[in-house]
Image (spheres, grey):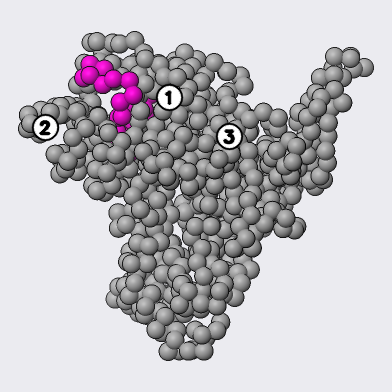
Amino acid sequence: MESSAERRLKAIQNHLVPFIDDRSLSFIRSNPTAGEFVQGQGFSVVLPEKLQTGKWNVYRSARSPLKLVTGFPDHPEIATLHDNFEHAVQTYQDYKYLGTRIRVDGTIGDYKWMTYGEAGTARTAIGSGLHYYGLQPGARVGLYFINRPEWLIVDHACSAYSYTSVPLYDTLGPDAVKYIVNHADVQAIFCVPGTLNTLLTFLSEIPSVRLIVVVGGIDEHLPSLPSTTGMKLLSYTRLLSQGRSSMQPFCPPKPEDIATICYTSGTTGTPKGVVLSHANLIASVAGMTLSIKFYPSDIYISYLPLAHIYERANQITSAYYGVAVGFYQGDNLKLMDDLATLRPTIFSSVPRLYNRIYAGITNAVQTSGVLKQRLFNAAYNSKKQAVMNGRKPSPMWDRLVFNKIKDKLGGRVRLMTSGASPLSPDVMEFLRVCFGCLVMEGYGMTETSCVISSMDDSDLLTGHVGSPNPACEIKLVDVPEMSYTSEDRPHPRGEICVRGPIIFEGYYKDEVQTREVIDEDGWLHTGDIGLWLPGGRLKIIDRKKNIFKLAQGEYIAPEKIENVYAKCKFVAQCFVYGDSFNSSLVAVVCVEPDVFKEWASSEGIKYESLGQLCNDPRAKAAVLAEMDAVGREAQLRGFEFAKAVTLVIEPFTIENGLLTPTFKVKRPQAKAYFAKAISDMYNELSTSDPAAQKSL
């Protein structure tokens, strides 16, 4: 029999944690002894925006409905990134932390590890070294190299001594790097020999820089700088040694101090500096720990750009839980080899890579012969039924089929996360079945310190980005010009707005653009269009900024269509274009070379080069037919289908200016880059069917 204390505890728990029912019946629950009310929506709860007059349109996580999370519930003393890493050093001192395969002589071997304690000592030495060279608290420190252990050690040093880290994408190009260094008044830059060469080309144009530290550099081989520059150039090893001989006490930051300025290389304009405080980042990560648990036994592979908030947040989380972080070699083409060697338990990626894994497996199955194809389909369908119904699938299918697939990622992955852009529901379901692990999709942006919403680990439904991070609240605001309103039925729709302790401080030195995205009530307007599914799940359906009209007045959201076409077996990358002068869409497709070659071979088509094959009308017709089939399956509307296609071999990359560092298409640049192809496609359409161009 329950005691009175147990009954009271249960009453409190019932009040604070709404009953999660996948049928998502809407109800209001209150505790008779309290004055607060929340409307349960399964994974979310709904509250009124204003207590007296507001309508019930603000969604919060059901895990923390009455108070937004600002810190770790189990460790409220952790208020800054410095506190977080100090907690890790003290708690996990002898645990593996940073691993790399790259030897001093540049050769590749097994992973060698630095412990949390060793990384803590190196952090103190680097911070002391920067102090030795005169850097004062608040100084900006640039990081101009790709993922490797030294990146995190420098970042931890910045936190410990109240410096502000400024990541510099190694692929941004000289002009953008020069702009960021000057705009942020960067005083010290950590680079590698390759990026040092870039810095040397505009050294006289970055007067704020006083110190350049070369990671992997040897002092005797470094160039000597003219004394007129006033800069010092030395190796990371030397700075480490100087710091060790003159260790300084920490100069801990306050929660409200700036932790980092992340410059987002958007699809247009110059980079904007997103100012994030220690409190912002701690709140964001702490909120996510209510739903995702890591362990010191976990191993994480770091290959997503550390200059991007997605990877940065993963690193803060990893340190909090004492996770071992293994770094890739630095070459995406060798990532699969790194995965097989490291055998991680946590794998974070973006839809672009997951789509390639999906396409690679399905293509291998289709070309494996009838018997193997039947075996795979039988295994897949049986395991899918079990997974989607929350049952344990038969281990037989893993032994016969799926263990070979799991081994591609090392064989131990227990959690996959996806972010940066929408993941197709089919691909997510495929990953869950083939890899037999938890697959979670999240939604976020740099301005919200990463995660805005994420799927719950108990949620089997796909095609959404979950419920709010417990550290923020979300509402949808009407967009009348696109016919989206919060009164829409069956699902409220509108622009996604976010508020809470995860919202950034503003754009650095840009009050005008800050005011454009944060309103007077503190809501950040994301520019994304969402709807609420039953259960309080958020689904991204459109983009406010990138929409355009066709000649007949139809609104087009090209990213949505590109995400559909990404599932086409021929498509590696896709750029959909349209404008108000034309009544149909056209597309530029970067083809998957292997699939393209196999198709040509099966059709008996001879060709001298892939470039020649791309121009073959039969190839264009085949790709367009496959895109049409995928579009019909996704229920695209008639005017959302591309009516002509140009095939290219050259990938869209950051280097050729067609992608942002987060792998989004730079639309104005792509339009200019493919201007002739676009013009040719529209000319071809108007010649072949003039009536179609006037009214589709």
Q: Is residue 441 left or right of residue 333?
A: right
Q: Is residue 24 left or right of residue 637?
A: right
Check residue 500 in the rendering and tell me which mark sits there, or answer none: 3
Can I make out residue 618 in this image? yes
Q: Observer-nearest residue: 672 or 500?
A: 500
Give the residue displayed 61% in from the left and 72% down from the top.
Answer: 637
The residue singled out by tag 1 in the image is: 257
Q: Observer-nearest residue: 455 or 265?
A: 265
Q: Secondary structure at mark 1?
A: loop
Residue 562 picture location, percent across and down: 50, 63
Stretch in magenta: 131-157
Tag 3: amino acid = Gly
Residue 672 picture location, percent across and down: 33, 67
The residue singled out by tag 2 in the image is: 229
Give the residue displayed 38% in from the left and 41% down from the top.
Answer: 510
**Are there few (<14), some (14-19), or many (20+) residues within 10 Å of tag 1?**
many
Cβ atoms at labels 3 and 2 below 8 Å apart? no
* Among the 4 quarters of the image, the one containing residue 231: top left
Q: Is residue 333 left or right of residue 413?
A: left
**Are there few (<14), some (14-19), or many (20+) residues within 10 Å of tag 3?**
many
Tag 1: amino acid = Asp
Whichever of labels 3 and 2 marks the residue nearer the N terminus, that label is 2
* Among the 4 quarters of the image, the one containing residue 147: top left
Give the residue displayed 38% in from the left and 55% down from the top.
Answer: 268
* Among the 4 quarters of the image, the one containing residue 284: top right
Q: Quadrant of the C terminus?
A: bottom right
**Structural distance between the alpha carbons of marks 1 and 3:** 17 Å
